[in-house]
Image (tube, rainbow, N blue to C red):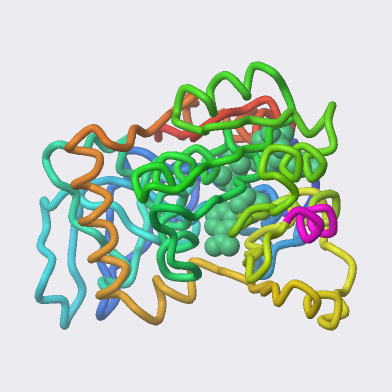
Amino acid sequence: MKAIVFAETGGPEVLALGDIPKPGVRPGAVLIKNHAIGVNFADTRFRQGTYTVKPKLPDSPGMEVAGVIEAVGDGVTNLRPGMRVAAFTSRAYAEYCVSPAFMVIPLPDSVSFVDGAAFLIQVLTAYHLLHTADSTGPGRSVLVHSAAGGVGLAAVQLAKVAGARVFGTVSSDAKAGLATENGADTVINYAREKFADEVLRLTGDRGVDLILDAVGKPTFEEGLRCLAPFGHLVLYGRAGGAPDPLNVSVLSPKSQKVSAFSLPTLTRGFPDKTRESAERCFALMREGRIKLHVAKTFPLAQAAEAHRYLESRQSTGKLILIP
Ligand SMILES: NC(=O)c1ccc[n+]([C@@H]2O[C@H](COP(=O)([O-])OP(=O)(O)OC[C@H]3O[C@@H](n4cnc5c(N)ncnc54)[C@H](OP(=O)(O)O)[C@@H]3O)[C@@H](O)[C@H]2O)c1
């Protein structure tokens, strides 16, 4: 089968289209014919060898797909060939992938393959940041960094659905427009303005209740400066580098909380909760209360282009590969 393979870690140029054996189905897993493949920022880190999971070279990137089940392994009773599904997986940049049955989510007819692949990691990350890591609801204020990105746009919309006041940060005016269209109450261009000063000004020096931070080094300390008393900062990525170590005592004067979040904690350890949240988000999509923004689709062979675009900070919403 065709797959994107890299034999050494490095820049996008290490990604090449190759031929590798089609995987076989194994007990407890399903074989999926991929129709759409989600591109995630973590794939770029995996390619560089700087992600928590290290490549076993030669390897293929990719963590999520939508497609049709071609075969089910021994012991799989809740899924069958022909079902349309989205799945958390590995080596997804290919024509087929294998996924453990407990990491497969049936797709409603109303959700296309492209939306299925766009939805899984980014929408569920946003959902669980707001509702599992925290308890977002009416009267709370949330600051979403990179608010026009994949997780960011989903978080802005889901925080509004929950009734929160939403602040977003972005690095360009074009992105600011998109975050506003998707419901952000205030969007700050943090390439131009000090976002903490602006948040403090707009909240009468109180700050926000929740900060969703996947940028890291450039935003973490500034975030603490505009976090309200009893506020919560969740670090869930480090697109701009890892923040400096934190002396927890700096949180005491305002009784603040800092935590970390990783979606695989849920998808691997709490499959029922993962499915339940997926169904809740599918319902919100059906009702038109959240919309997926697929900025670009690329043929599988152009995976390197997709990575270049994502790392350039120009991309918005979701990027998809079509095998
Ligand atoms: N913990 C988890 O389970 C989990 C799950 C999914 C994603 N994530 C993390 O969430 C973040 C967003 O992921 P995504 O796939 O939705 O990507 P994305 O937000 O669509 O794209 C990455 C964005 O990060 C921002 N950014 C800030 N500093 C950057 C830098 N130095 N280089 C490149 N980009 C930079 C850019 O937006 P601006 O220019 O507007 O800042 C860029 O558009 C990533 O850090 C990812 O690792 C974590």
Question: Which residue is found at the position 25% from the left and 79% from the top?
Answer: 28
Rendered position, 210 above or below 284: below
Rendered position, 126 above or below 308: below
Quadrant of picture, ligand 1: top right
Q: Is residue 8 visible?
A: no
Question: Which residue is found at the position 45% from the left and 48% from the top?
Answer: 164
Depth check: give the residue in front, 20 or 196: 196
As drawn, which residue projects farthest toward the front? 204
Q: Is residue 147 visible?
A: yes
Left or right: 189 in relation to 184: right
Q: Is residue 81 magenta?
A: no
Depth check: give the residue in front, 163 or 132: 163
Magenta extent: 220-226
Depth check: give the residue in front, 73 or 36: 36
Residue 162, x across and y down, in percent: 36, 50
- What quarter of the picture does the C terminus occupy? top left
Rendered position, 305 above or below 206: above
Question: Which residue is found at the position 50% from the left and 70% from the top?
Answer: 133
Residue 167, x across and y down, in percent: 60, 40
Residue 82, x across and y down, in percent: 11, 51
Q: Look at the magenta stretch and give its main secondary structure.
A: helix
User: Residue 60 appears in which quarter of the rendering?
Assistant: bottom right
The mark total stands at 0
